[in-house]
Image (spheres, grey):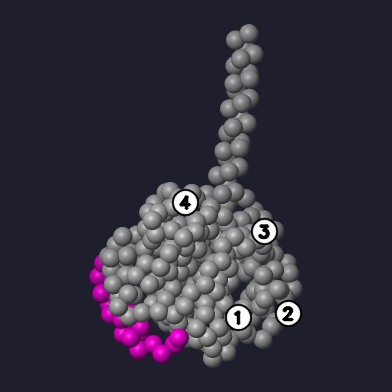
Amino acid sequence: MVGIVLVVACGLAVVLGVRALWRFATGPEDLLPGRAPDLALTQAPPVVEPDRLRFAVVGDNGTGGRNAMRVGRAMAEAYQEEPFSLLVHTGDLVYYGDLADRYEEVYVRPLRPLLDAGVTVRPVLGNHEFDYTATLRLLERLGLPGRYYSFRAGPVEFFMLDSTPPQFGGDGGAAQLAWLEQRLEASTAAWQVVVLHHPPYSSGRRRPGDMVVRAALEPVLVEHGADLVLTGHDHHYERTSPQQGITYIVAGSGAKLTGVGRSPFTAASARRLHFLVIDVEGDQLSGRTIDASGRVFDEFRLEPR
């Protein structure tokens, strides 16, 4: 009888262990390989006009695994329906190594249909791109002007920040904040969108929002009129209600998943693989958050401050 109980207990432990390993491999770490999206997309005219822009947003998809490929396919399918000319990346382009070594696997394979269609990718640096030498190679390979930079696309000016340590909390923070103040003050775009990796607001179960980043950055954004802040790092989706007029979005589950709750500032949150498609037309900005199956699970609309 005791032997039977032990066998049953061992069998149950094995089953539970396999299930736990599967959840870990496909969710928090995305370790299982997947089939790269193989859609052949027609190169569409860019959706960029003086008062009109459509762009997509993804973050933390640099695993090279099954989930990253699912999200890549869903983005390509979204492009088929409504082409976009720009993909904004909220950081962590690579996990488990150096992007110089894994460039084809983690960057090109999930995004190949979009890259072949001529979509421009504009990333910020994540905490997995913190190594100085590797970052220099990354900047050169992707044709980026520096660790932080800005660019204009139609009615939107994007301010791409470096929130990796020691930025904001260290010596590099003052220079970057001074640069940001000057650029925001000089901007003539109808919309100002700020992009960085570490979220000032987050209800992540594993870690809350980065209070050092919030304390340093939020006063500048409030004073100089930013409209929308896009972030990653936490592997979930979350959209805030406007905080002093600014909406903050965590778009950090392009491959990995961790838990998320709700806070007084939360308008929507979900533990789902996802990306966003955002349309800007004149004085209206509308966004859709889409999961790896192509389903829209959040929608929002903003007006400029």
Residue 108 horizontal/vertical position (percent): 61, 69
Tell me the element at label 3: loop
User: Which mark lies nearer to you, 3 or 1?
Assistant: 3
The type of residue carrying mark 3 is Ser
Going 70% across and 82% down the picture, which residue do you hit? Answer: 43
Tell me the residue that label 1 is attached to: 85
Q: Label for residue 293?
A: 3
The type of residue carrying mark 1 is Ser
**Among numbered discs 1 and 2, the one appearing first in the sequence:** 2
Going 56% across and 62% down the picture, which residue do you hit? Answer: 298
| Residue 229, quarter of picture | bottom left
The answer to whether 199 appears left or right of 104 in the picture is left
- Nearer to the camera, 258 or 54: 54
The type of residue carrying mark 2 is Thr
> Up-down: is 178 above or below 203?
below
Tell me the residue that label 4 is attached to: 260
Q: Quadrant of the C terminus?
A: bottom left
Can residue 71 be seen from the camera position used here? Answer: no
In whole angstroms, how far apart are the C-alphas of marks 4 and 1? Answer: 31 Å
User: Which mark lies nearer to you, 4 or 2?
Assistant: 4
| Residue 233, quarter of picture | bottom left
Tell me the element at label 4: loop
Tell me the element at label 2: loop
Label 4 neighbourhood size at 10 Å, few (<14), some (14-19), many (20+)? many
Tell me the residue that label 2 is attached to: 42
The answer to whether 16 appears left or right of 149 in the picture is right
Residue 151 horizontal/vertical position (percent): 46, 84
**Among numbered discs 3 and 2, the one appearing first in the sequence:** 2
Q: Residue 185: within the magenta?
A: yes
In whole angstroms, how far apart are the C-alphas of marks 1 and 2? Answer: 12 Å
